């Protein structure tokens, strides 16, 4: 659940990590043979990294309140369907073309193909 803050911080430090990687690659002797470094190196070389982090931040901002609300000992099952439908619809509106939603009364009737 606390992914939003981590993602925002990753966006803030991404330029510094990219600079570190560029400087490290200049000196071939300082390149680390570590699997963690390889993961970071691969991520930094992804030209969509900032966009992916931004999208992930939007998704976590939407999902975290839902997770917090339903992570309780209270009987929340009666409210689960409406809230989950709302979250799913909001997420789908971000990636599915608007014309797909026209004339559709239920999410299960949406043709996602």
Image: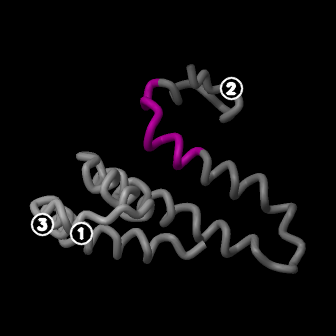
Q: Say which label, 3 or 1, has the lower sequence index.
A: 1
Q: Is residue 110 above or below residue 95?
A: above
Q: Residue at x 63, y 52 (%)?
A: 86
Q: Write down the region rendered in magenta.
A: 89-99
Q: Is residue 39 left or right of residue 108?
A: left
Q: Residue at x 65, y 66 (%)?
A: 66
Which mark, residue 60? none
Q: Depth-wise, is mark 2 or mark 3 nearer the camera?
A: 3
Q: How many discs mark residues in the rendered view?
A: 3
Work out which quarter of the rendered image holds the N terminus and state it: bottom right
Please say if the residues under marks 1 and 2 sit with CB atoms less than 8 Å apart.
no
* Residue placed under numbered mark 2 in the picture: 109
Q: Is residue 18 left or right of residue 8?
A: left
Nearest the eye: 47 or 68 = 47
Q: Is residue 13 above or below residue 60?
A: below
> Element at badge 3?
helix
Q: Say which label, 2 or 3, has the lower sequence index.
A: 3
Q: Is residue 39 above or below residue 13?
A: above
The image quarter containing residue 112 is top right
Q: Is residue 90 magenta?
A: yes
Q: At which x and y percent is residue 49?
A: 30, 53
Query: Mark 2 and mark 3: span between their CA atoms?
Result: 52 Å
Query: Mark 1 and mark 2: span between their CA atoms?
Result: 44 Å
Q: Depth-wise, is mark 3 or mark 1 nearer the camera?
A: 3
> Element at badge 1?
helix
* Residue placed under numbered mark 1 in the picture: 17
- Identify the residue at the far front of this view: 29
* Residue placed under numbered mark 3 in the picture: 23
Q: At which x and y percent is residue 28?
A: 16, 60
Q: Residue at x 67, y 68 (%)?
A: 67
Q: At which x and y percent is residue 40?
A: 35, 60
Dot 2 surroundings within 10 Å: few (below 14), some, or many (20 or more)? few
């Amino acid at each position: 659940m606390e992914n939003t803050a981590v993602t925002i911080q990753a966006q803030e430090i991404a330029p510094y990590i990219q600079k570190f990687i560029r400087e490290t690659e200049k000196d071939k002797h300082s390149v680390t043979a570590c699997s963690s470094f390889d993961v970071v190196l691969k991520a930094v070389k992804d030209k969509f990294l900032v966009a992916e982090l931004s999208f992930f931040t939007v998704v976590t901002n939407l999902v975290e309140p839902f997770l917090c609300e339903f992570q309780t000992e209270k009987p929340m099952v009666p409210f689960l369907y409406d809230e989950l439908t709302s979250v799913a619809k909001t997420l789908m509106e971000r990636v599915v073309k608007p014309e797909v939603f026209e004339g559709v009364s239920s999410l299960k009737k949406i043709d996602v193909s």
